[in-house]
Amino acid sequence: MIVQRYVVIDLETTGNSPKKGDRIIQFAGVVIENDRIIEEFSTFIRPGVEIPVFIEELTGINDLMVKDAPVFEEVAPKIVEMLSNSCFVAHNVLFDLSFLQEELKRCGYDGFFGSAIDTVELSKLLLPTSDSYKLSYLAKQEGFTHTRPHRADSDAYVTAMLFINLKKKLFSLPLLTLKHMYRLSLSLKSELAELVKESIDIRKKSSPIHNPNIEIFRGLALNNSDAIPPNSEGDNPEYPAARSEKLAMLSKAFSNPEIREGQLKMMDIVYHSFEKSTHAIIEAGTGIGKSLGYLLPAVYISKTTGTPVMIGTHTLQLQEQLLGKELPKLRAMLPFPVSAVLIKGRSNYLSLAKFERSLREKEDNYETALTKIQILVWLTETVTGDRDELNLTSGGQLFWERLQSEETIYKGLQEPWVEKDFFERAKKKAAKADIIVTNHSFLLADYRSETTFFSGILNLVLDEAHHIEKAASRYLGDKLDYITVKTMLNRIGMHDQKQLLYRLEKMVQEYEINCDDPYQSIEREINDFSYEFEQMFYTLARLAEKNASAAGYNRSAIRIQHSNEQRGFLKPAQLLAERLIHYLAEIYKKILFRTVQLQNMQEQLKKNQLFFLNEIDSVLAGILQVKSMLHEFFLNPSEENVYFLETNKTVSHSSISLYSQPIDAGEKLWKEYLTRYDSVVMTSATLSVKGSFRFFMDQLGVPKEKGIQKAIFPSSFDYRKNVKALIAKEMPDINRVTADEYTNALAKHIISAASASKGRMLVLFTSNEMLRNTYEKVKESGRIEDFSLFAQGVSGGSRSRLIRNFQSFEKAVLFGTASFWDGIDIPGEALSCLAIARLPFSPPDEPITEAKCNKIRLEGKNPFSVYALPEALLRFRQGFGRLIRTRDDKGILLVLDRRIVSAKYGEEFRRALPSLEWMEAGQLELSKEIDDWL
């Protein structure tokens, strides 16, 4: 019988375990019938135990508030009555239901035996693109008022409203999608199958819902609202060369446009670079309006040449900003239409052919079933097929690898889907666009590709260009890690495991192919390879442990140099590598023979068998890649590359990854790729050191030719008015104390600064270890217990999620390293104090840094002045750029590293921010200055 009555429950409790004495302190229930709330009930409950401090802080419920409340035994009859003949609904149903069951049993009741629905799970299915499934986030996203999070009455009401909305969305889905969902929902944790079945039954009895944006194709309901635009036609518009023309255009997009001379001059430089096929390097400070500074001339040159202009960025945030904020402004300014598209690497897009096939598979574990339903719902919404739109679980991300788009030699697999294929459609739209936005990674992938995607494009803008050299070093290198190789072996499997080898052998027998080598010989080689691969990584783990103990702490990266010191460890690894390469060659040869024989019979093969051969091809490519990496890393290293291994803090063999990266990737990138374009405009807010682009040009191998235009447009912000720059006088010299003594002093200064600034503080570090130790000391001090502390690599979550959490609390401190120095945008009062724990020099034993410095030293130059110092100065400016993001922002810059005044080079860091007045102060005086300024 279909349940039409739902009771939404929320509990506040003293802890997580009723069996250990935790009790309910507030109960709330909301009854829903026919998608309407018909009853609400809530009450405080006297728990008979003290409410812990952290629960009081979380919920706002204290012992006084529950002193005269009923005990659970008095409320239980009402709860049992409410739940009778109902479906139990909760946000994270397992907690509320299991806790309530224990309490009911304790009071002599049988408990609840009806259906249960989890709105977290339901939200994941029906809102697959949501950034978070926390109740407060979903409430805001869906437009509900949630005045008192972590109070049962408010949480239950908001959960009920969310559930009603989700039910309505479920009912609105195409009937075909619902039918797919029903089969898959049987593998879910809560009883959502009943809800889906109810929607199907109602839909069958109702008039068909016509949605013109939905198309049914080969058993899938797809969003068809994104037509590929025709080529734009018309006269070539004339570029607005006059200052007055540009200002008139800007006035169409801005009600009261601010005249930024740097932006106007930048537009002309970019246009003339494109027009004359020359290159340009432009530093455009914060507030200049850099994006429009290159977008406007890019559109005009695109219209003139009839080819798109490529915009390459480092961060997703800037890509979203360009398409979501800057393009609408540009369109408002121009008297003609502008088309812009975002394109990424092929593996970012869903293969509809693979997904269609996956729906025919009968065995689905929980993660796979969940992900398939998410994709089914998403297909009714997405026009891009881009995985970054989805919020997938870790299991879902693994499943995506089976579904991602890839090139195939089996054309028959894609034929039905060619017109619908997301990647192919993205390419067609890009070819007809004025502006193509992509990331540095896709540009670099194109560089490595045998068939370039961007062959017809003449002009390129590299935004966030200060990242390109290091991105090239990573992307043009190779990686071999334990987990990837073991995953590959598991995919091949033994015959009795019924993986790829088993299925391949079945096809060989079916089509009566004669093989000289039985499959048992492949199994033996896989077993031998697996055993010796384990031995190799145990050997590498011992090398990592030796280096870690010698340094006094566990380093994350260890350079492999084939030196006398490492020879004792590397010799066994080299012998193992030779044998591993032999095993891989044999495995590859025998699987390839079988595959080629079957490929020659393509016309006779079934479609699912062609899909299978496509999987085999990807495994064969993986085998070749592992073989090549082992050979280069251990037997034939190149002098142009640096080799190193990375491991986690425990130095377990399974955590080891091997890397090969070019030492001078930037130079290679410039000579072999960027010069393919007629014009490359490189821009960023931080490219110059002491007013010169020489360091950036040297890193990228850009020749010292006169044809390259260079310009620096300083920020339009008045930093002296906006920023108080402070130096901590009582911090110890970092080179004269232990790491523990330094982090103790850091923690004390951070606590006092955070108290004075009332949070809203970002602390930047140069090492994960120093960050972690300082964070722990601040947390354990208990001096800012009412603050929310978030630490990269400790608190969990992505960078964007940490920033979002930081912004949602007024009294918060965010500890960041690496990527937090650059590319994050926290405008307004959410960030009022920026502390720099240590001047941002790269560790001298970091493999790439060490290799670069050695090379510079061999050239007879000083690596500190030529490389280490300029790189640190640029990074220092990038870190400072996080503080003031708009003209009205006001903040504190607090430098905690005494070297900024005590070292000879300290003055160069102070001069790097020329408009600031610096002040040294002791800890008490620092607090007063911060408090007064803010």
Image (tube, rainbow, N blue to C red):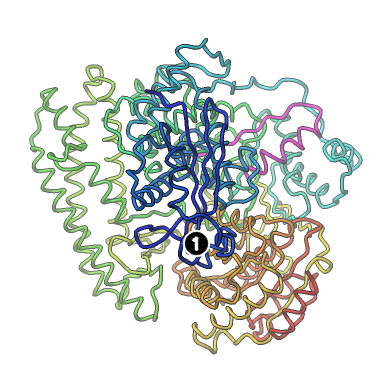
Q: Position of residue 288 (x, y in %)?
A: 78, 52
Position of 317 compared to 883: left or right?
left
Q: Position of residue 365 (x, y in %)?
A: 30, 38
Quarter of the image that includes the N terminus: top left
Residue at 47% across, 33% down: 6
Q: Which residues are magenta?
A: 319-344
Can residue 269 be seen in this snapshot?
yes
Q: Residue furthest bottom?
A: 736
Badge 1: residue crowd in 10 Å (few <14, some 14–19, many ≥20): few
Residue at 72% across, 54% down: 282
Can residue 674 be seen in this snapshot?
no
Q: Is residue 35 magenta?
A: no
Out of 374 and 873, give the one closest to the viewer.
374
Position of 356 compared to 380: left or right?
left
Residue 426: quadrant of the picture:
top right
Out of 146 and 670, give the one closest to the viewer.
146
Vertical relation: 103 (above or below) 241: below
Position of 886 compared to 40: left or right?
right
Residue at 69% across, 62% down: 831
Q: Position of residue 869 (x, y in %)?
A: 61, 73
Vertical relation: 340 (above or below) 491: above
Out of 474 and 898, give the one closest to the viewer.
898
Vertical relation: 291 (above or below) 921: above
Q: Is residue 335 magenta?
A: yes
Vertical relation: 874 (above or below) 588: below
Mark 1 = which residue?
795
Q: Secondary structure at mark 1?
A: loop
Position of 379 compared to 249: left or right?
left
Out of 589 and 408, give the one closest to the viewer.
408
Q: How many marks?
A: 1
Q: Amino acid at mark 1?
A: Ser
Q: Position of residue 705 (x, y in %)?
A: 67, 56
